[in-house]
Image (cartoon, rainbow, N blue to C red):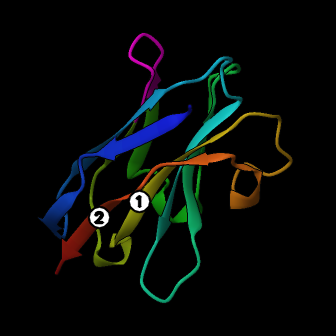
Amino acid sequence: QVQLVESGGGSVQTGGSLRLSCAASGYTSSPYYMGWFRQAPGKERGAVAAMHLRARVAYYADSVKGRFTISQDNAKNTLYLQMNSLKPEDTAIYYCATALRPVISWSSPNYYDNWGQGTQVTVSS
């Protein structure tokens, strides 16, 4: 059974940093993509960043480029999201997700098959 477990969320002030982790288990074959999405109250779930695990290519939403860095440790089956220069608008529940097949759009949640339970990130001004 596939399982994704996020950790690392918390509360920080504007300009602070957090590192999210997503531990993956139960896969019989390597996913094509692992990514981070977020959902703020009253808003739709949106893409933050993703990595094509086989090509080792990273993708970012424009709103986080230059501030967030996605990385993945194969040996630990863990995905990370380093978040720097955090802003109040980054406040959301952050979800880890995996896509088991090639996708047309890395940023569309519809292409992702498995999701974690989410971790809350709160940035205060």
Q: Is residue 33 above or below residue 12?
A: above
- Verify whether residue 52 appears in magenta: no
Picture coordinates of residue 116, whole percent (x, y): 46, 49
In the depicted structure, whether residue 19 falls above or below residue 24: below
Q: x%, y% of residue 108?
A: 73, 59
Name the mark on residue 94.
Answer: 1
The quarter of the picture where the C terminus appears is bottom left
Q: Residue at x 28, y 64 (%)?
A: 121
Q: Which mark is residue 120?
A: 2
Q: Residue farthest to the right? A: 104
Side of 123 relative to 1 (left or right): left
Q: Quadrant of residue 61?
A: bottom right
Q: Are marks 1 and 2 in contact (CB under 8 Å)?
A: yes
Q: Amino acid at mark 1?
A: Tyr
Q: Label 1: few (<14), some or many (≥20) within 10 Å?
A: many
Residue 67 visible in the shown view? yes
Question: In the structure shown, which secondary structural element does the residue marked by tag 1 occupy?
Answer: strand
Residue 73 is inside the magenta segment:
yes
Q: Which residue lies at the image location 29% right of the left edge and 71% below the top edge?
A: 87
Q: Mark 2 is on which residue type?
A: Gln
Instruction: State the residue lying farthest toward the bottom.
Output: 42
**Region in magenta:** 72-79
